[in-house]
Amino acid sequence: MEFFDVYPRFQVNVVKGKGCYVYDDKGQEYLDLYGGHAVISVGHAHPAYVKAISDQVAKLGFYSNSVINTLQDDLSHLLGKTCGYEDYSLFLVNSGAESNENAIKLASFHNGRKKVLAFHKSFHGRTTAAARVTDNPNYSPAAYMGFDVAFVDLNDIEAVRKELATGEYSSVIIEGIQGVGGIQVPQDQFMRDLREECTKTGTVLILDEIQSGYGRSGKFFAHQYAGIKPDLICVAKGIGNGLPMSGLLVSPIFKAVAGQLGTTFGGNHLACAAAISVLNIMNEEKLVENAAEVGAYLLSELKGFKGIKEVRGRGLMIGMEFEQPIKEIRSNLLYEQKVFTGVAGQYTIRLLPPLCLTKAQASDFLERFQKVLK
Ligand SMILES: Cc1ncc(COP(=O)(O)O)c(C=O)c1O
């Protein structure tokens, strides 16, 4: 049997990682400014993380949600305290799409409404509801088409007002910072107005912080720049530093109803041990503060680079848009300069490094980047 070939791939066989570096099968070192698509938060193979998951799997890797699992409570308390949402509850699942799927479901159970409002350039995942609220028809086959969704422009509060005034919408879903859409940062005032409109119309506000959350923006959640509190917050990617897991932070307006949500794998012992270790490392090493500091340095330096049309982002979530397609620049960065980067569309390079990126590693990247721009 062969692997189902749906991924365009770089010809690099990555076999090892350490901190902000990965290594191929020939021992070549690469600076990782991509974090395996924003997944590596505390760095590759962090010793405390390796020990935590090794110890846990040696004791008990998995048991189902039919028994008490105190690791789930430990994780909920630690996450609540770390991100400032101690009065919220935590539901655990396995992937970003699944987290959004459950958020849309819970919102609809809550207010009984059907429709969802989303934004142009959004990306929320590839399962039914998540794919339909993604602004790309290529991800939704005919079988998904019964789902009722509308899209408006990011930052267009009048368009939001007009839609929500119909009273038909169950929820609005928005990314803390749009990632796949090219690192589009919503205006803080827009976020505050959106919060107000949702409250006024009984619409649930869902913040997809799957890419922009968990410290990446330089605050724990990107929406915290606007000083708002969403009703549901979706997290994934960095939560397990590579161990597949995701979560849904649920505000106190929702009542837990037995059987309404559920999962086999979500919140298992190994995943919880990984997530607890990630938060402990983030707190001990002050990685959110580091993302803010090193991110600000990168952003200000990159804004001085010639040849880049626009630099956008917050913290260690940075987009660089070019006038010309970036395929060659990115490929030279990888094969000549040994630097991994991400991409958004044809014109934007995305930087999503581990949150432990040092200022020295950031300057090293800038030097290598300068060489491919010449
Ligand atoms: C903002 C956002 N939401 C949802 C997802 C989907 O996450 P997953 O691929 O884990 O389902 C992604 C993945 O890139 C994302 O960036």
Image: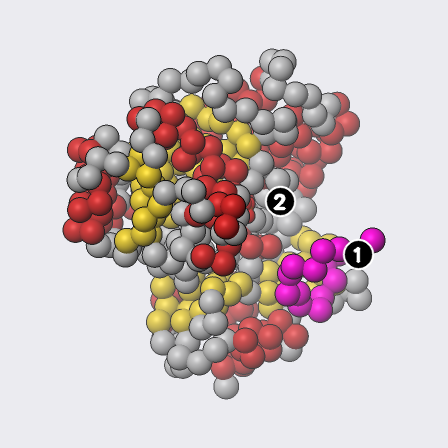
Residue 95 visible = yes
152 vs 149, nearest the viewer:
149
Residue at the image point whose x is 49% and y is 58% from the top: 138
Magenta residues, as a range?
1-15
Residue at the image point whose x is 26% and y is 36% from the top: 168
Secondary structure state at the residue bearing disc 2: loop
Q: Is residue 270 left or right of residue 130?
A: right
Q: Amino acid at mark 2?
A: Gly
Secondary structure state at the residue bearing disc 1: loop
Q: Residue 2: give its label.
A: 1
Answer whether labels 2 and 1 touch (C-beta < 8 Å). no
Q: Main secondary structure of the magenta part?
A: loop
Query: Which mark sits nearer the N-terminus, 2 or 1?
Result: 1
Coordinates of residue 218 in the picture (x, y in percent): 39, 49
Coordinates of residue 73 in the picture (x, y in percent): 52, 20
172 vs 252, nearest the viewer:
172
Q: Which residue is mark 2?
A: 242
